[in-house]
Image (cartoon, grey):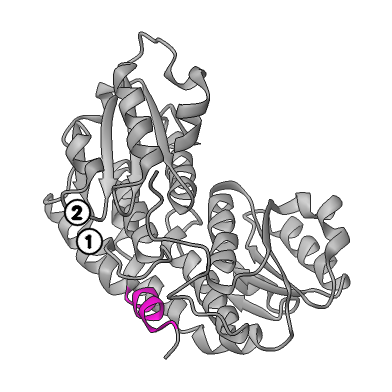
Amino acid sequence: MTGHVTWRELISQPDAWKALLGRLESGALALPFAVEDFDEFILLGSGTSYYLALSVADWMRRRGLNARAIPSCEVLLDEYETRPSAARRLAIGFSRSGYSSELILANRALKAAGFRLLGISCTEESDLLNEADHGLLISEGYEDGLVMLRSFSTMLITAQYLFGTAKDRKALVKLPASGRAALAFEGPLSALANARPYDRFVFLASGPSHPLALEAALKIQEMAIATSEAYHSLDYRHGPKACADENTAVVLFALSERDHGLALARDIKALGASVIVIGHDAAAYADIAELACPVSDMDDATGAAAVLLPAQIFAYATALRRDQNPDAPVNLSKVVMF
C-alpha cells in the first residue's frame, strides 16, 4: 500500500497519546525546573516544529506566561533575538529528530546570550537533548515516516500538560477518546477528497487554532505535493478569495464566535468552493459545509491534537488521489542539516 508507514503513524496517535498521558500523570515525564524560575520564554522550531512552537506559545500566553515563538533561523539572522537582557530567559526548542542544524546553531547562540535551554525531541540521545540544559524525550512521538504527524501531537500534548493548569490536565486526559472519534471520519473525508479534482487548498482558523491551519496546509504540501494556503479566518474575505473556484477545498476550523463563522462558511460556498469544518462547534455548520467534523467537546486549544487529525486524513487521502506517495515526498528529507 502506498503511504502505509504514514497511515500507520497517523492512526496510531490516540494510542500514543494514552501512553504519553500515563507517563505525564505518573510524574515520570516532568519539567526539571519551576516555571516561576523564568521571566521570558522563547520557543523555537523549523517547519512543523515552528507551528508547534506557535501553538505552545499561544497556550502559555493565555496562562499568563511571557512567551513567544520564532523560527529557529531567525536567531541566526536577526541579532535582536540574542540581545542582552537582565531577564531570566528560557529557550524551548522543538525538534522531532533533535538534529536540525538551524535549531542546534540557534540554541548555541542563545546559550551564549544567557538563555537556559529546554530541548524537546522524539529521538533518544539526539544533539538537542545532549546539548540542552534540560531535555525531554517524547519517545511516543518517534516516527519512521518522513511527514511529522505523531511527533507534532505528542510534543504538543506534553507542553500543554507541563505548562497547563490542574484543570487543563484533567481535560487533556480525554484526548485519546477524542482522537478515536476523529479517526471515525476517515471514510467521509476520503470520499470528499476524491469528490472533485481539487487543485487549490485553503485552511482558515483564528485564535489558538491558527497554528493548526498553518500545519494542516503544510501537510497538503508535503503529502499531496500541492499548493496550499493558510489565513486568519476572516482575512480570507479580502484578497485571497479571488482565487476560489469549484476546485478549491477550504478547511475551516470552527470559530468560537459562531455567527461570524457561519457567515464566512456561506460566503465561501457562494464562491463555488467546498467547505470542511473541524472543531468542537463543527456540527453547527452541518447545513452549510460538505462535511462537518465535531471531533471534540473540549475548547479549541485543549482539543488541538484531536482537531488536527481530520486535516491530516484529508491531506493523506488527497495525496493518494493525486498519485503521490506520502512515505516519500519529493524534494524532502527527514532532517534538514547543513
Q: Main secondary structure of the magenta part?
A: helix
Q: Is residue 62 visible?
A: no
> Is 255 situated above or below 110?
below
Q: Which residues are magenta?
A: 3-12
**Callout 1: SS:** helix
Q: Is residue 51 left or right of residue 137?
A: right
* Residue closer to the observer: 34 or 316: 316
Gap between marks 1 and 2 measured at Cα: 6 Å
Tell me where residue 56 sits by quadrant. Answer: top left
Question: Where, quadrant-wise, is the C terminus in this rendering?
Answer: top left
Q: Quadrant of the N terminus?
A: bottom left
Residue 247, image x, y percentages? 79, 77
Image point 17% across, 44% down: which residue? 30
Q: Which residue is mark 1?
A: 20
| Residue 74 placement, left or right of 100 | right
Query: What type is the residue that disc 2 sits on?
Result: Leu
Q: Is residue 87 above or below residue 16?
A: above
Mark 1 vs 2: CB contact within 8 A: yes
Can the viewer see residue 241 in this picture? yes
Residue named by callout 2? 24
The residue under the point 34% across, 48% down is 95
Horizontal and vertical percent position of residue 219: 53, 65
Q: Is residue 302 above or below residue 194?
A: above
The three-letter amino acid code for the residue at tag 1 is Leu
**Rendering coords of residue 167 (x, y %):** 33, 49
Based on the picture, tell me whether residue 93 belongs to the magenta stretch.
no
Q: Residue at x 39, y 72 (%)?
A: 179
Outermost residue, front direction? 338
Crowding at dot 2, Cα within 10 Å, few <14 / some 14-19 / many 20+, comes out as some
Disc 2 element: helix
**Percent position of residue 54, x then y:** 49, 43
